[in-house]
Amino acid sequence: MKRNQRSILQSIEFEFIDPDGELSDGPPISFFPEIERTGNLIAANDMVTNRTTITIRFSYPLTKAVEFQTTSDTGFTKLDLFRAIYNGYKTIYTAEKDPGTMKGPLLNRAKSKGPYGIYGHYMTDLVLDSVDEVRPGYFELTICS
C-alpha cells in the first residue's frame, strides 16, 4: 500500500533545539546522544503509546526493509521512541561493513552487501522527519537525508 493510501492512527513530529539554540525539525538520527544528554528534544516526555511492546519498520536507506520490536515497562515517550529508532539504525549500520563511497563527485555511501543492503547514505546523513503509527503499536518512519 502506498504511503498516502494507508490509514494513520497518529503522526509524531520531532522538533528539537539545535546546538545554536534554534528550533529545528527532524533531528539527525546520529544526533541522538546529544539530544539525550542535553534534553533538547521538544516534548520529549510526551507519551506516544502506553503499549509495552512496539514494532518499528526501517526501510530507508535499505534495499531490504526490516522490523525491530522493542519493549518498555511503562510505554513509550517521544524520547523513548527516538532512542529505539536510533538503536535500530545503530544495529543496522553496525551489521554491515562500510563499502566506501560511490564513484563520482558526491560522497554517497556505496551499496552494502549485508543483510539490509544499505545504500546511498551514512547514518550521519539521516534525518528523522516523522513517525507514523499505522496500526496499534506498529510504526513506520519518514526519513530524509
Image (cartoon, rainbow, N blue to C red):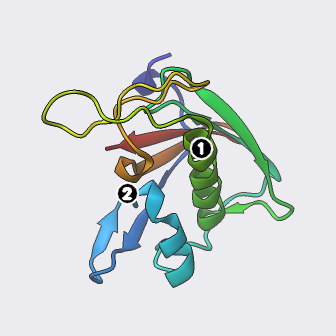
Q: Residue at x 59, y 63 (%)?
A: 78
Q: Residue 78 carries which label?
A: none
Q: Nearer the viewer, residue 101 or 87?
A: 101
Between disc 2 and disc 1, the foreground one is 1
Q: Is residue 96 above or below residue 21?
A: above
Where's residue 31, x and y in %?
44, 65
Q: How far apart are marks 2 and 1 (CA)?
A: 23 Å
Left-right relation of 87 to 108: right
Where 41 falls versus 29 (above or below)?
below
- Can residue 43 be seen here? The reply is no
Percent across and percent down for residue 128 are: 43, 51
Residue drawn at 67 percent across, 32 percent down: 67
Residue beneath label 1, please?
94
Question: In the image, is 23 to the left or to the right of 136?
Answer: left
Q: Which of 128 and 13 is in front in this view?
A: 128
Q: Residue at x 53, y 35 (%)?
A: 97
Tell me if I can see residue 24 in this picture: yes
Lateral position of residue 105 relative to residue 117, left or right: left
Q: In which quarter of the image is residue 47?
A: bottom right
**Front residue (pair 115, 54):** 115
Q: Residues within 10 Å of mark 2 (few under 14, many from 20)?
A: some
**Of the residues shown, which amino acid type is indicated by label 2?**
Gly
Disc 2 + disc 1, Cβ < 8 Å: no
| Numbered disc 2: secondary structure | loop
Dot 2 corresponds to which residue? Answer: 26
Which residue is at a point 35% across and 28% down the rendered structure image? 110
Q: Which of 18 and 73 is in front in this view?
A: 18
Q: Left of 104 or right of it: where is 20?
A: right
Disc on the earlier residue, 2 or 1: 2
Label 1: how many residues lie within 10 Å, few (<14), some (14-19) or many (20+)?
few
